[in-house]
Image (cartoon, grey):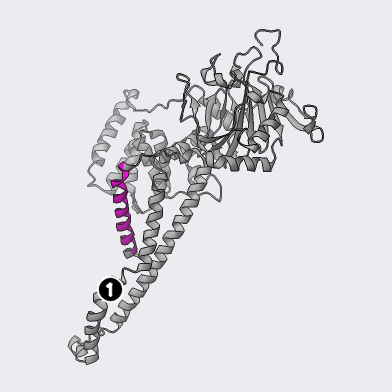
């Protein structure tokens, strides 16, 4: 098996060298697999195919090497037994003849034996496949995105690292090894994120086998050293001293441990007289983050007084199509008016929209408030596709159906936007409408976005709620496949409604598919009339 690994290493090294020499001929693509769960499914399928091809190659190599081993074993079996005279053994003419024959027929051709055309063809096909897809495979940006996703979920849902390590309680999830846990902590140290580094490195230490100094590539001393460094930066000087003392006990000849121990002990002693000497790392949180997280994890709930004013109803008066099958209407909140229409989309409609959108998915963009240009943003982690009604029958069908529900002129609606959220996919608090009264980016679309219809196209096992952060407490809407949530973004006087500021919580477990339909204010003058109150 060692021979196989050496061969694979040499071929991979050659492949990497050739790829680097040609890298200047190609423009580096944008890697953003972490932004879409749909793309992660593609990666899984690719990985399965690559694994099967590698295993086929390894099996062929093993078969070839097994044959080679049998030949060598047969030779060894013919050698003189230990303790027997070699000269006496060679005195038998058949033995001498056999050796001469092997050196004339077997050993000179063993090189040909190790270069089987079958295995060579397998290897060439394998790396030909890899070279074709190499530029499209995940890159460093995807690893950073995945790492940030883990921390975003930790912070939003107040989860310890142990929950992720054990697969969030699910049987399907991969349980992380001590080495993998350390790698995450190590990466955190590299970006000076000692808050998360301490959690992950401490878990790695807790799970490190007792009495063992090495697990795979990871040794206990390195783990202790990185953990002590993070504890020190967090101001936990006692822990830093204790961990470093363990290193000195394990290896008294360690070069840096005595120096670090002296530093930590000095600062610990000095902190008794000057508490500010503790190098505490302060985490910067955005002004909305605490409330956002409390809404997402369910700690903030709606007041019972408000709940008592909400209600459900069947509605068959909006359009003839709803006479026999009335709309299932639930009033979720009053200011702003949030209305959910249950079972608005059927499974076949959802499947058709997804099928059309999958090949068109691109990383979602937002309007830059300064330039009006569409740009990528870390606060929106998803991929989106636009389905134009004039080009796509299912998009036209869905848009017309929504129009029959909300009674607005859909000639002034945007195309149907389909979104698939990736690893910890989210959208931080935002307005759907422009906060500028006459937005340039919406000029050709018919003014500002007067209303939003958010269509849920999947259930989400955990997380993924839509929350409203400028309202009373507890306005959180959990995804329900086939349901649609509608609200007006603008007041009747055309001003933006500040209470419509909302966010998409990170997806903790599962996949989240939604469709957005934004309707603009032109053409709605007689469908949503102004009131006599200029402030309304």
- Above/below status of 380 relative to 18: above
Instruction: Please state if 54 lies on the left or on the right of 9 as rendered.
Output: right
- Taking the view exactly as shown, the residue that stands out farthest to the bottom is 92
Does residue 65 belong to the magenta stretch? no
Q: Is residue 15 magenta?
A: yes
The residue shown at (36%, 41%) is: 186
Residue lying farthest to the left in this orientation: 87
From this viewpoint, is residue 461 visible? no
In the foreground, 455 or 214 = 455
Q: Which residues are magenta?
A: 4-24
Question: How many residues crowd mark 1 within 10 Å: few (<14), some (14–19), many (20+)?
Answer: few
Q: Residue at horizontal 23%, vertical 75%? A: 108
Position of the N terminus, as image quadrant, is: bottom left
95 above or below 200? below
Q: Main secondary structure of the magenta part?
A: helix
What residue did someone put label 1 on? 110
Residue 465 visible? The answer is yes
* Quadrant position of the C terminus in the picture: top right
């Amino acid at each position: 098996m060692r021979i196989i690994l050496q061969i694979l290493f040499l071929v991979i090294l050659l492949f990497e060298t050739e790829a680097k020499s040609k890298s200047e001929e190609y423009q580096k693509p944008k890697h953003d697999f972490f932004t879409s769960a749909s793309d992660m499914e593609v990666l899984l399928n690719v990985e399965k195919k690559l694994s099967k091809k590698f295993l086929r190659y390894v099996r062929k190599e093993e078969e070839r090497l097994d044959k080679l081993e049998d030949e060598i074993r047969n030779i060894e079996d013919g050698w003189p037994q230990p303790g027997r005279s070699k000269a006496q053994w060679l005195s038998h003419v058949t033995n001498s003849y056999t050796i001469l024959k092997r050196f004339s027929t077997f050993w000179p051709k063993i090189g040909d034996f190790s270069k089987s055309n079958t295995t060579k063809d397998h290897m060439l096909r394998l790396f030909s496949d890899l070279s074709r897809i190499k530029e499209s495979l995940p890159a460093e940006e995807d690893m950073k995105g995945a790492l940030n996703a883990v921390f975003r979920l930790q912070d939003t849902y107040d989860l310890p690292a142990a929950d992720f390590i054990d697969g969030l309680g699910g049987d399907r999830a991969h349980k992380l090894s001590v080495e993998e846990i350390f790698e995450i902590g190590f990466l955190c140290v590299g970006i000076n994120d000692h808050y998360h580094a301490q959690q992950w490195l401490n878990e790695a230490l807790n799970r490190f086998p007792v009495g063992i100094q090495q697990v795979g590539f990871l040794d206990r001393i390195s783990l202790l050293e990185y953990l002590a460094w993070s504890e020190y930066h967090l101001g936990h000087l006692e822990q830093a001293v204790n961990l470093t003392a363990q290193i000195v006990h394990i290896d008294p000849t360690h070069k840096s441990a005595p120096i670090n121990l002296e530093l930590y002990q000095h600062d610990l002693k000095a902190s008794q007289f000057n508490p500010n000497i503790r190098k505490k790392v302060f985490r910067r949180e955005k002004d909305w983050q605490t409330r956002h997280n409390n809404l997402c994890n369910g700690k903030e709930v709606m007041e019972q007084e408000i709940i008592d004013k909400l209600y459900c109803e069947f509605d068959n008066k909006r359009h003839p199509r709803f006479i026999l099958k009335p709309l299932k209407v639930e009033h979720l909140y009053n200011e702003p008016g949030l209305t959910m229409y249950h079972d608005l989309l059927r499974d076949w409609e959802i499947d058709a929209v997804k099928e059309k959108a999958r090949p068109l998915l691109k990383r979602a963009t937002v309007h830059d408030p300064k330039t009006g240009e569409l740009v990528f943003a870390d606060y929106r982690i998803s991929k989106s596709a636009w389905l134009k009604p004039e080009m796509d029958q299912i998009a036209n069908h869905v848009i017309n159906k929504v129009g029959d529900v909300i009674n607005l002129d859909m000639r002034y609606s945007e195309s149907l936007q389909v979104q698939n959220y990736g690893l910890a996919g989210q959208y931080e608090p935002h307005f759907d409408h422009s906060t500028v009264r006459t937005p340039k980016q919406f000029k050709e679309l018919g003014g500002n976005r007067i209303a939003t219809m958010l269509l849920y196209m999947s259930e989400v096992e955990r997380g993924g709620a839509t929350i409203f952060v400028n309202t009373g407490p507890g306005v959180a809407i959990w995804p329900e496949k086939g349901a649609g949530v509608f609200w007006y973004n603008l007041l009747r006087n055309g001003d933006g409604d500040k209470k419509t500021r909302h966010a998409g919580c990170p997806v903790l477990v599962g996949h989240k598919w939604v469709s957005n339909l934004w309707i603009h204010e032109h053409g709605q003058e007689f469908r949503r009339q102004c009131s006599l109150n200029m402030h309304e």
